[in-house]
Amino acid sequence: MGKKIVDFLWGSTQRKIWTSLIVILMLASLVTKLVLPVPPPHVALSGEPIFSTGPQWFTNSVLTTIIVDIILLLLALLTRFGLKEVPSGLQNVMEAVVEALYGLAESVAGKNAAKFFPWVATIFLFVIVSNWSGLIPGVGSIGFYHPTEAHSEEAPAGESHGALLDGQLAMVGGSIILAAPENAQHAPVAAESEHGKFVPLFRAPSADLNVTFALAIATMVMVQIWGVRHLGGAYFRKFFNWSGPNAFMKGINAFVGILELISEFARIIAFGFRLFGNIFAGEIVLATMAFLFAFLLPIPFYALEVFVGFVQALVFMMLALVFFQMSTISHGSHDEHH
Amino acid sequence: MDALGIEWTLLLAQIVNFAILIVLLRMFLYQPVLNMLNARKERIAQSMKDAERVSAAAREAEQDKAKVLEQARREAQEIRAQATRDAEKIAQDVRGRAEQEATDIRMKSQADAAKQVELALADANKQIADLAILATEKLLGRELANKAEQQRFVAEFLAEPGSKGK
């Protein structure tokens, strides 16, 4: 048994290299923690303006949204202008992605797939790139220190929970901002007063409620538009329906209509918070793990977050697709998709 | 709303951003790629159809070839059979004619021989008759006065039973 373990860890040259590397990283984590204390992770619920004196709307998530747009458009343009009958490289990947998404759209929406496809495919691509953008080292960890005074002026409403949420630093690559003061861990508040509030330069767009709610609202508005386009005015009978054989059924139908109306709004909220919650929570998990033990420990969580990012993009897309499709079907039996 | 960081301007900006992204991606990614995929699908279907047709043509050509070969073989056989038959007939003809000729020659030669024998016999008879007359003349010492009488007499003699005749 003991020999087996020794063999496993120290059997070959390769094994020796890996084992030493792992041990060194673990020791480095400990040393980092003891000698160069990492401040607890910076947690902010919303995107923050990058420049304390600059425009308020220019938050870190807006910047990252623009970067995500640029990435997507670059991919699209590279694919578009390198399009060949015999595909290779990038074109293969993009064709596979587009075809898979189109297949999915077709499996749900059938003949409506061509109409819904640009919407759901854009949702998927934008959301997945946004989700994964938060996993790039440096996103959330590279940033500026804003003077505290400016901060308190900027967001007085945030101050109430600021003691809990704001004013701390270091996300995933906690070691990257080891420039943080040594006493930061012991006295984060002091650090804040000394250096001001830390504001990361980048923030995953899907970890900003503005983005997720924008997608949710756009989706649900489109659901109404598809519904009207397919069913005309009859679409609204779903919400305002007081037909029935007797007064009791009329009442029931009217009540169901009200529920339908509420559920449309509930869907917006569910859409918005589902994506935001998953991605934001994932970032906090990664930051916390990095804070606890800088090396190795975050790796499995990274894998998990890559998966979560994909799944959330898929979920958002599939739900949008299903809602689009449902809106085109005339009123019958409805089942909730939450 | 403020606590959650939701701002209407940012929300609106993100919606506009999303809409622009849809338009641009549709223009530069979805439509070209889907068109390309469809074009390729059609092309593959077309080339498969072509291949099908070519192989069908090849199969047909193979069948034609077999048919032609079969036909040629049958004709050759027929020709051979015909030739054999003709040859046999010719041989038979030749043989028949040869036989005929042989028979003719034989008959003719027989006839010739018979005639010669007859002539020889007649000649012999005449000589014998002459000799006999001569002998008789000598014997009788006189010559039959009447030449005709003499000849008749010899003929009678020769025609008598027991004498040698034809």
Image (cartoon, coloured by chain):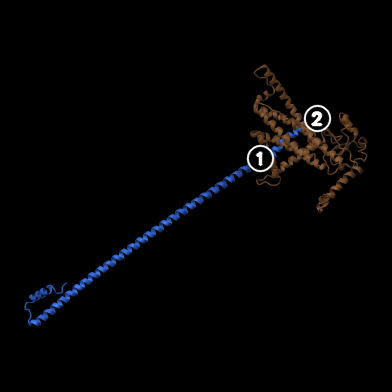
Q: Quadrant of the C terminus of chain A?
A: top right
Q: Amino acid at mark 2?
A: Glu
Quarter of image, res B135: bottom left
Q: Is residue B92 above or below residue A98?
A: below
Q: How many marks?
A: 2
Q: At which x and y percent is residue A314?
A: 73, 36
Q: Is residue A318 visible?
A: yes
Q: CA distance from mark 2 to mark 1?
A: 37 Å
Residue A121: quarter of image: top right
Query: Which residue does the numbered mark 2 point to in the structure image?
Result: B7
Residue closest to the far top: A247
Between residues A148 and A125, which one lies in front from this camera angle?
Answer: A125
Element under disc 2: loop
Name the residue type under label 1. Answer: Leu
Q: Residue furthest front?
A: A1
Location of residue A336 in the rendering, given as x and y in whole percent from the top left corner: 71, 28
Residue matched to label 1: B34
Q: Colour of chain B?
A: blue
User: Which chain did the image draw in brown?
Assistant: A
Picture quadrant where residue A269 is located: top right
Numbered disc 2: what chain? B
What subunit carries mark 1?
B
In front: A2, or B151? A2
Looking at the image, is mark 2 or mark 1 earlier in the sequence? 2
Horizontal side of residue B26 vs A155, given as left or right = left
